[in-house]
Image (tube, rainbow, N blue to C red):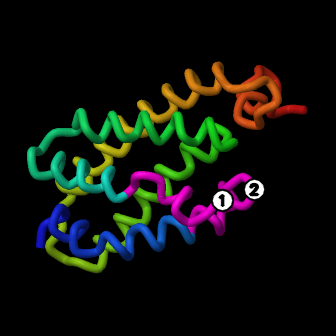
Amino acid sequence: MTLDVLIEKKLPLIIETFVSEVRVYQLVPGNKSNVEIANQIEAFMSAVVYALRRGHGKDPEALRLAGYHGEQRARIGYDLRAVLGEFGILRATIVEIASQNDSITVAELERLAEVIHASMIEAATRFVAQSARVPAGNVARSALRPGSASR
């Protein structure tokens, strides 16, 4: 089974594990619902599957959805560390599930890493841009202020 087929087949497990792990690592600000946490992940994973099938690391739809994700996270009070952490959790979840299938190749995992990495950069870029537009008291904006990590 190829990685793209495995992702499609295991998508509910990927989403469930992602939501659970994001909570375990305490990346969620406040009492966000599972729907808010899973924000567009199903559509994003469809774009990842498409990118894997095309052999392309920078899929326009994956980048668009990742950018939307970054903006959404800024609006609901996430910090940049949490946004980046989510992409790491998503990658680790997929790799863990894929490791149970001997037919997944290193090349497929490398392509997945390329898609996730490019998407993470887009999400972070759009998060920062959105954070500059949110009200001054928002947690997301204060997390980006120079020196805020050391306070």
Q: Which image quarter: residue 5?
A: bottom left
Q: Is residue 3 magenta?
A: no
Three-letter amino acid code of the residue under disc 2: Gly
* Image spot of residue 2 (x, y percent): 13, 67
Q: Residue at x 82, y 30 (%)?
A: 137
* Image spot of residue 58 (x, y percent): 24, 34
The residue tagged 1 is 32
* Image spot of residue 55 (x, y percent): 12, 44
Q: Is residue 38 magenta?
A: yes
Q: Residue at x 19, y 64 (%)?
A: 3
Closer to the camera in the image, 34 or 96: 34
Name the image quarter holding the C terminus.
Answer: top right
Report the magenta residues as a range: 21-41
* Image spot of residue 120 (x, y percent): 44, 39
Q: Is residue 84 left or right of residue 133?
A: left
Mark 2 falls on what kind of element?
Answer: loop
Q: Which numbered dot is residue 30?
A: 2
Name the image quarter holding the N terminus.
Answer: bottom left
Residue 58 visible, this angle: no
